[in-house]
Amino acid sequence: MADFVHVPDPQAGPNGTGRIRYDLRRPAPRSGTASPPLVLLGGMTQTVSSWGGQLRPLSATRTVVAYETRGQGGTELSLGDVSLARQVEDAASFIAALDLPGPVDLCGFSFGGRVALAIAAHRPDLVRRLVLSGVARGRTVLARCILGGWAAALTTGSLEALARVSMADIVGTEYLEAHAGLVEPMVKAVVQRNSYAGIAALFRDVMQTDKAPQPEAGAQGWDNATLAAAVQCPALVMGGEGDRLAAPAEVAALAEAMGAVHKTFSPAGHTIPIEAAGPWREAVVDFLDASR
């Protein structure tokens, strides 16, 4: 069940605090596991509810917690700066506030994957193992066109416009055809569970940085290629064969840059934790347990 934890919020003043929304599941006492906690970070418009199908099975043998970052869902933190640098600080505060024994295992999808990559690069003390899904080393022309379309949708002031425009870009064709009845509920979930201000802030400070040429972004130290070079922990990088946003070749390039294990799911699109839920979860668990 979702809950809130108070964390420092420097943007709210010297003594400012805010709240991060999260869902924490613990294994049954008889499981006898000593696995590190697993922290989940979702895509830009996802919330803890988006992990509903994964939380219970993943928590069978380990503590699992999903949380909504600054700008996502019901998390209550200032929006003046929601950059990756700020997200890294928030993650450290969140882990400390929940008193999670570390280092933790970190698993991020899409936007959440970029946050997880930044955490692993800038706070290696916090992360034992890293799992990334739908994260590319760089953006193709097609991916930049897609982001441009999302930006245009946001100028309408409507989250529904963004949800509808992005649906065909992130969910694989076969999954959409097989689950046509889920389209409207998915759109409704984006609108009801997020705020326009929060998503617009994330797009402003994180997503639109991809529009800059890679060398210019790299000079700031927060592009994926630069972050990947700083990661010290073992990593698993996964992508969908039909992903239009994180092209398979660029996902493979990120894995190679990190010396990471690489896996591709066919015929999935961008949302592999949903489209290939069982195989994706099996790959995650196998990787996290490999050293045990």
Image (cartoon, rainbow, N blue to C red):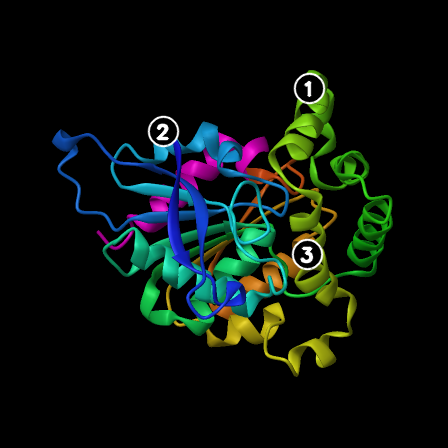
Residue pictured at 41% horizontal, 66% vertical: 15
The residues bearing labels 1 and 2 have C-alpha atoms spaced at a distance of 24 Å
User: Do the numbered discs 3 and 1 sit on residues whose CB atoms are within 8 Å?
Assistant: no
The label on residue 273 is: none
Front one among 215 and 45:
45
Residue pictured at 63% horizontal, 63% vertical: 80
Residue 124: x %, y % from top left: 37, 70
The residues bearing labels 2 and 3 have C-alpha atoms spaced at a distance of 31 Å
Look at the image and give the residue range highlighted in magenta: 273-292
- Tell me: residue 175, above or below residue 156: above
- Left or right relative to 70: residue 3: left
Per the image, the residue denoted by label 3 is 201
Give the structural element (helix, strand or loop) at label 3. Answer: helix
Residue pictured at 87% horizontal, 50% vertical: 152
> Neighbour class for label 2 at 10 Å: few (<14), some, many (≥20)?
some
- Tell me: residue 136, above or below residue 284: below
Q: Nearer the viewer, mark 2 or mark 3?
A: 3
Query: Is residue 247 shown in magenta?
Result: no
Q: Quarter-wise, where is residue 47 in the image?
A: top right
Per the image, the residue denoted by label 2 is 56
Give the structural element (helix, strand or loop) at label 1. Answer: helix
> Neighbour class for label 3 at 10 Å: few (<14), some, many (≥20)?
many
Query: Is residue 277 shown in magenta?
Result: yes
Dot 2 or dot 3, earlier in sequence = 2
Type of amino acid under label 1: Ala
Image quadrant where one finds the N terminus: top left
The residues bearing labels 3 and 1 have C-alpha atoms spaced at a distance of 33 Å
Per the image, the residue denoted by label 1 is 178
Type of amino acid under label 3: Ala
